[in-house]
Amino acid sequence: MNQQMVTPDSTKSQTSVTITRQEQSSLLTSSMGLCSFLVNIDAIDVALLRQNQYVTTYLDNGPHILRVSNSCKSVGLGIRKSLKINAEGTPQKYETNEGYWGQYNIWRTG
């Protein structure tokens, strides 16, 4: 886990952003639930998430790119999902999962 990204810095204007990997049946995913999700923000690896785990990051206010990919390179085949987010001071929550065909989904929940 990238400690700098998960530790708030009181000297900067930052936004709390929480990313949760949903729990889902391993039969409904191409990786059979065996691989962690690699959470990456602005080309920096932040955390590896198993099912039903989350990470809270503290981002400097402004635009960022949130990316989720599969940690199992042979299974992931380079499949990933990216989302442009704007840190604006209000806490944000996102959830992610893997679809049956191996696609990744990310959406804002709060």
Image (spheres, grey):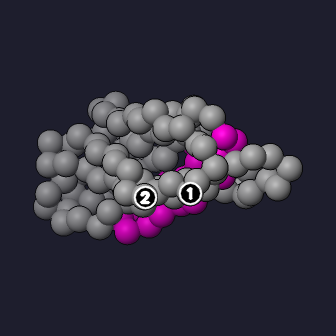
Element type where label 1 sits in the image: loop
* Number of residues whose C-alpha sits closer than 10 Å to that of mark 2, classed few (under 14), some (14–19) or many (20 or more): few
> Which badge, 2 or 1, is on the more N-terminal residue?
1
**Contact, CB < 8 Å: mark 2 with mark 1?**
yes
Name the residue carrying label 2.
110
Magenta extent: 45-61
Quadrant location, the C terminus: bottom left
Residue 90 is drawn in which quadrant?
bottom right
Mark 2–mark 1 Cα distance, whole angstroms, equals 8 Å
Work out whether residue 73 or residue 11 is closer to the camera in this orientation and state it: 11
Name the residue carrying label 1.
91
Label 1 is placed on what type of residue? Pro
Element type where label 2 sits in the image: loop
Residue 4 placed where, x, y %? 73, 50
Residue 106 placed where, x, y %? 34, 46
Q: Is residue 102 left or right of residue 36?
A: left
Is residue 72 among what the camera can see? no
Taking the spot 14% from the left edge, 49% from the top edge, the residue there is 100
Q: Is residue 80 magenta-colored?
A: no
Secondary structure predominantly adopted by residues drawn in magenta: strand
Q: Is residue 58 magenta-colored?
A: yes
